[in-house]
Image: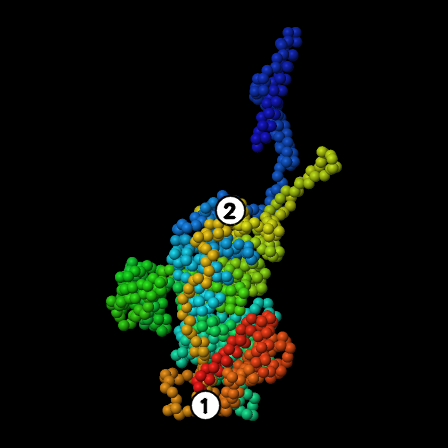
Amino acid sequence: MPLSAFLFVGMFLIANFLLNLSLELIETTFSDLLHPKPFHMEVGFLFQMPIAEHPIYYLLVFLVVIGTIARTVYKLKSSFKNLNNHEKGSSRFTTVEELKKQYRAVPDREETFKGGGGVVISRLGDKVFIDDSPVNNLIIGTTRSGKGETYVFPTIDVYSRAEHKPSLIFNDPKGELFSASKETLEERGYHIEVLNLLTPLDSMSYNLLQLVKDAYKDGDYSTAQALCKTLSHTLYYKPGVKDPFWQDCAMSLCNAMILAITDKCIAEGTEEKITMYAVANMLSELGSKEIIIDPEEPPKNALDLYFENLPSDSVAKMQYATSNFSKGQARGGIFTQTMNGLSIFTFDEIAKMTAKNSVDLKRVGFGKTIKGKVTPRKRIEIVFPDGSKESIKSDITGRFALDFKKVIKVGDTIQFNEKGNKKKKTSISIMKIDEKTGDTEFKVIEENEDIQVITVDYFDKPVAIFMITPDFDSSNHVIASIFVRQLYFILAKGASLARGGKCHREVVFCLDEFGNMPSIEGMANIITVCLGRNVRFNLVIQAYAQLKNKYGEDADTIDGNCGNTIYILTNDQETAEKVSKKLGNQTINLSSRSGKGLSTDKNKTESLDQRPLLTANELMNFKEGESAVIRVIKRQDNNRKRIRPRPIYNTGETALKYRWEYLGVEFDTDKSILDIDIDSLHDDVNPNSLIVDFLGERKEKTSEPKQEDLPPVETMQPIEEPTMMGIDEEIPEEAFQQEDSPFDSLSIENWKEKTVSEFFESDLAVLKLVDKFFLAQLGKAIDEVENQEMGEFYSEFQMLAHNDHIDKSVYQAVENKINRILRDLEEKEQITS
């Protein structure tokens, strides 16, 4: 534009000068030929514009000037303008100024800040930019890439310094997150729990069947079945298998046994036995027993007999039907695969840890609850101390449970009215609140017999749970996956029943080494809906192949529902190429020249091409602290103006710092988990006390001893379905005597001289493990092994284990069975002596 104006003015002045010059020449030369005037030229000719006398001339000049300028400008632009109009890609990285406008900047250490926390996106100086919007995050970082130092620890720090602190759930493979963070998090008001699969005796207690038991007691059988399916899916599901028959049957058998034991123990009043150890023992004891009912017919499996005699409408019996359709070798294969999944629960430490429950999972997202009982299907109005009201409708049993957000303190009064009937009123006064446990004591100051307040829980602390999953032994990692799934079930159910459909406290999962955890049932569906329930997931993987391996086709859904992909480093070419493609392409100018080598007269050409913002090789060569953020749903800035979610490249002044550079005091990784005492409820649990004695009941009923010969026992309610009693009359006592006689001859003195089959007579499933997993290493046929002396077999077995020729989980399963039989022999000898 300035060039055009300059040309226009210049050309117009020249044209003006020529016109005036011509007029002067004509006037001096031709006005008086005899007496011509002297010719003179002056600068004023440039500015004298006789437009009125010569309009046509000026019109022509104007047209010529405009045309000349247009042609000149066109040629100049065609020759020298930038050809790049983003024809082949318009991606670019977000600028620092844009970062300031689009993300909230908070102090990078120590200071508390208002509002909620978020994941660290970038940094500048002593500020970090966080994304506090509802978003799931996928973090990609290979081993030793610094993902813990640059992402996990800073994220823990930011969330724990926020005014509104969320509950935090961590997968902690090395235990360093727990040991380094525990003290700081407790100082910042967190309640700490640890699910320690490294040393289960130093762990919180976690009964995987607690939720199933609670649902069954409430008569919610569909929920109990759904919880069983969730658990068994995590135990047995493997994506991509060609024939899912085996895993499907194993799931059904596992579900059936869980429901059967739950039903039996609740009916007998022995709820403490509802554990995964009891489930594994049920399959081990009954699955290997063959009982002769009719000498003319083949013996029947004890597990089959048990389920056959359950009522036809039993939920456990219907689940068992799937595995019961198979016979022969297929049946044995189902039993073996099911036992493989349950074997980890037979280890003594795991059996103890999973025998009790020390954590109320609901407190992770809902810490304040009032429970009571009123007239069934009536709506109750609850008036809080500040005058605010909430109402809830009781269920068909009259029970209600209200999760509330209001603040209450000692001395406050809470009133309960039946809506529509103000005369029915109960009032309570808060007497004491235990800040550590949330247990609240209250006194009834006005009571109506139709409105009962059962419990008030007021737990107002955020919870941090660390799942320590040792990387050298993945056999028990499945417990962590089940824990995540069950916790989400509780949170989602509570959110569905809460006003607003959200958890009252934000819950953030940070699952380090997510790609190495056993698959979580329904993860693709969870991650699509969790944000609306105030639940966030941060999934840390090493490469996209890990997601594909664990979740199959669902991997794309999981990836697609992570609004931020934070790339740190990878050595996987396919992952680098996928990230490069997600970053997008930019249009670049290419220049080329041609001519003779020593000539200064070169021909130059320009062209356009596309280039990734960062190529796969560039992504695989990031410096320490560098990262790339691909954001999809961040489409508003801090002032809610619409923006394009362009990727972020953290390098130079925006590169992330390592924990040791600025958080070394608050999160000291030199601290060891060995120096931390962890309270445990299950230290004194005896796994043998958890066994459900099906056969003992059968023997008592069959032999029909006299009442006076029986020891005094606690009176139980009659049990019709979930026992072996229904088949007692059909089974002769000789069947059990024949079954037990080989075991009776076994003793602690002679067990090494007995054959393998005699030693394992009470648990034939062990022989199936030998046959399937390490018979080839023994170099013998199965019948040779069965007839081999137990002492010789045990020596060979130990040697194979010492040389790593047997899978660790299989070795532990067989070793535990041997130790259990020897313990039983010792106890038997002590009793008889």
Whether residue 289 can be seen here: no
Does residue 187 sit above or below 83 in this rendering?
below
Q: Which numbered dot is residue 702?
A: 1
Label 1: state its secondary structure: helix
| Residue situated in front as seen by the camera: 273 or 492 | 273
Between marks 1 and 2, how big is the CA–CA gap? Answer: 79 Å
Residue that numbered label 2 is attached to: 654
Q: Is residue 5 left or right of residue 827?
A: right
Indicate the amino acid at tag 2.
Answer: Thr
| Residue situated in front as seen by the camera: 667 or 403 | 667
Q: Position of residue 509 (x, y in %)?
A: 47, 60
Q: Is residue 645 left or right of residue 85?
A: left
**Precedes in sequence: disc 1 or disc 2:** 2
Indicate the amino acid at tag 1.
Answer: Thr
Residue lying at 39% horizontally and 79% vertically, measured from the top left:
269
Most extreme residue toward the top, as rendered? 34
Residue lying at 61% horizontally and 13% vertically, measured from the top left:
40
Number of residues whose C-alpha sits closer than 10 Å to that of mark 2, classed few (under 14), some (14–19) or many (20 or more) = many
Q: Position of residue 469 (x, y in %)?
A: 50, 64
Most extreme residue toward the right, as rendered? 596
Q: Quadrant of residue 222?
A: bottom left
Location of the C terminus (image quadrant): bottom left
Q: Position of residue 369 (x, y in %)?
A: 35, 65
Q: Quadrant of residue 43?
A: top right
Residue lying at 57% horizontally and 50% vertically, measured from the top left:
622
Residue lying at 59% horizontally and 30% vertically, measured from the top left:
3
Q: Is residue 461 left or right of residue 340?
A: left
Whether residue 265 can be seen here: yes
| Residue situated in front as seen by the camera: 360 or 147 | 147
Does residue 342 sit above or below 22 in this rendering?
below
Number of residues whose C-alpha sits closer than 10 Å to that of mark 1, classed few (under 14), some (14–19) or many (20 or more) = some
